[in-house]
């Protein structure tokens, strides 16, 4: 009897472990990457935000070559399929400097308001890979 009970507990435990593996599955996402330039020059350290009509926005930050890749969450790259309002900004407030955190200096906005606070940008994200470049102008 003890062996039947032990076997049943093992089978139940394995069933529960298999059911819990792999983490949560989220919505289907399109993978989005591209390059941001201003007057033909790459824009470094810009925040790129894609905001859908409904749902969570996706964000990325450009590297020194202006390249970005969107993140939907800490665990997932991409953005929800559909139309998005897009904002690109270089403005940052000063942060850190407390405890062990390094001081990150404030950074002024280098990109015109028509691309961030008063954005005129919108793009559609499709399932699969999306390369979406932004060739911005200062005029």
Image: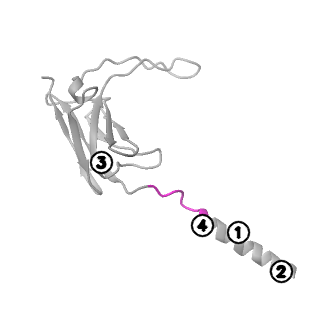
Residue 111 position within the rendered picture, expressed as x and y whole percent measured from the top left:
23, 24
The mark nearer the N terminus, 2 or 3, is 2
Which numbered disc covers residue 13? 1
Residue 130 position within the rendered picture, expressed as x and y whole percent measured from the top left:
25, 51
Mark 3 is surrounded, within 10 Å at the Cα level, by few (under 14), some (14 to 19) or many (20 or more) other residues, namely many
Mark 2 or 4: in front is 4
Compared to 84, does 44 lie above or below?
above
Inspect the magenta stretch and tell me whether residue 24 lies in it. yes
Say which residue label 4 marks: 19
Q: Secondary structure at mark 2?
A: helix
The mark nearer the N terminus, 1 or 3, is 1
Give the quadrant of residue 18.
bottom right
Mark 2 is surrounded, within 10 Å at the Cα level, by few (under 14), some (14 to 19) or many (20 or more) other residues, namely few
- Are dots 4 and 3 in contact, CB under 8 Å? no
The mark nearer the N terminus, 1 or 4, is 1
**Who's the residue at 31% across and 17% down the image?**
108
Q: Tell me the magenta residue range.
A: 20-26
Disc 2 from disc 3: Cα separation: 54 Å
Residue 131 position within the rendered picture, expressed as x and y whole percent measured from the top left:
23, 48
Say which residue label 2 marks: 3
Compared to 76, does 25 lie above or below?
below
């Amino acid at each position: 009897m003890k062996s039947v009970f032990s076997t049943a507990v093992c089978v139940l435990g394995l069933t529960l472990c298999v059911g819990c593996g792999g983490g949560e599955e989220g919505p289907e996402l399109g993978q989005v990457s591209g390059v941001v330039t201003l007057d033909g020059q790459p824009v470094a350290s810009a925040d790129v935000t894609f905001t859908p009509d409904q749902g969570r926005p996706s964000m990325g930050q450009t590297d020194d070559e202006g390249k970005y890749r969107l993140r939907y969450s800490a665990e997932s790259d991409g953005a929800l399929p559909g139309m998005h309002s897009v904002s690109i900004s270089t403005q940052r407030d000063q942060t850190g400097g407390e405890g062990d955190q390094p001081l990150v200096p404030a950074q002024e906005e280098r990109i015109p308001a028509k691309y961030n606070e008063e954005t005129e940008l919108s793009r559609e994200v499709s399932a699969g890979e999306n390369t979406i470049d932004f060739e911005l102008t200062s005029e």
